Image (tube, rainbow, N blue to C red):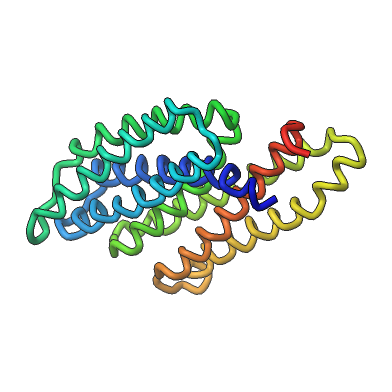
Amino acid sequence: MTELLPARLFAPLALTAVAALGLLVWVLKNGDLCPGQRRRISDGAMSVWAVFGLALMLGVEAGVPPVMLWLGGATLVAGLGTVLYQARMQGKRSLDVSWHYPALVLALVYGALVGWRMGAGWALLAAGAGGCVFAHLIMVRAKHRLQAFNVLLPLAGTAFGVIWLLALAIRAAGLSEPALAAMTLPFVQLSGAVLAGALVWFLPLLRKEQTKPPVIAVAALLILGALTLGQGMIWHMAGNIS
C-alpha cells in the first residue's frame, strides 16, 4: 500500500497549508499585533509554502491533473516571492497584509479544486482540523501574544477532527459486513490518532502551562496522520481501491 501514500497525503497536506494560510492572513489583518509579532508571523508563512510545495510534489506522484499542477506552481511562486521579498526588509518591518492576498486567492482556488476531487464535506473537515493545528504551530513559534487563540484554535481543530471521525463512522455503518471488517483496524488507528492529538494539543491548557512548539508539532503530526488514514478509508468506502 506504500505506493498509495503520496495520493493519500496529497489532499490533507494541501488543504492544511491553504487553511493555515487563510488563518494567518486573517490574524495579520485583524489581530492586535506589535511589529515584532507581525513580522514573525509573516515570516512563518514560509512553513506554509514548504508544506504546500511538498503537497505539490506528492501531487505529481499521485497523478494530479496538469492544470492543478500548473496552478499549484503559480501559487507557490507567488507565495514564496512574497515571503522572500519581505526577508530583504531589515528589523521588525513587514509587508502590508495585502501583499499576501494574490497568493491567498490562488491558494483558495487550488484548495477548492482539491476539495472538488476529495468531496466538499470531507475537504472542509480536513482543512479545518489540519489548518487550525498548523496555524497554531506557526503562531506559537512566532511567540504570539493573542492568548485567546491558544484556546480557540485547539477547540475548533478538535471539533473538526471529531466530526471527521464521526462522519467516517456514519459512512462506514452502511457497508457490508466484510467491507466493514476490513475497515475496523484503520478506524481504530484513526480514532487513536485524533484523540491523542487532541489530548496533546490541550495538554498545556490542562496543566495551565505556556504552549510550546514541540507540543503543537506532535499534535499536528497525529492529526495529519489521522487525516491521511481517513483519506484511505474514504477511498475504500467509495470503492476506488480494493
**Looking at the picture, does residue 194 appear above or below residue 102?**
below
Residue situated in front as seen by the camera: 212 or 204 = 212
Residue 150 place in picture, x, y as percent: 41, 59
Residue 219 place in picture, x, y as percent: 53, 62
Q: Residue at x 59, y 64 (%)?
A: 199
Relative to 197, is 67 on the left or the right?
A: left
Q: Residue furthest left?
A: 90
Q: How many marks?
A: 0
Residue 152 place in picture, x, y as percent: 44, 51
Q: Residue at x 64, y 42 (%)?
A: 231
Q: Residue furthest right?
A: 177
Residue situated in front as seen by the camera: 179 or 145 = 179
Residue 30 location, quadrant:
top left
Relative to 114, is 82 on the left or the right?
A: left
Residue situated in front as seen by the camera: 37 or 110 = 110
Q: Residue at x 14, y 47 (%)?
A: 85
Residue 99 location, quadrant:
top left
What quarter of the picture does the C terminus occupy? top right
Residue 52 place in picture, x, y as percent: 40, 45
Q: Residue at x 9, y 54 (%)?
A: 89
**Looking at the picture, does residue 98 appear above or below residue 146?**
above
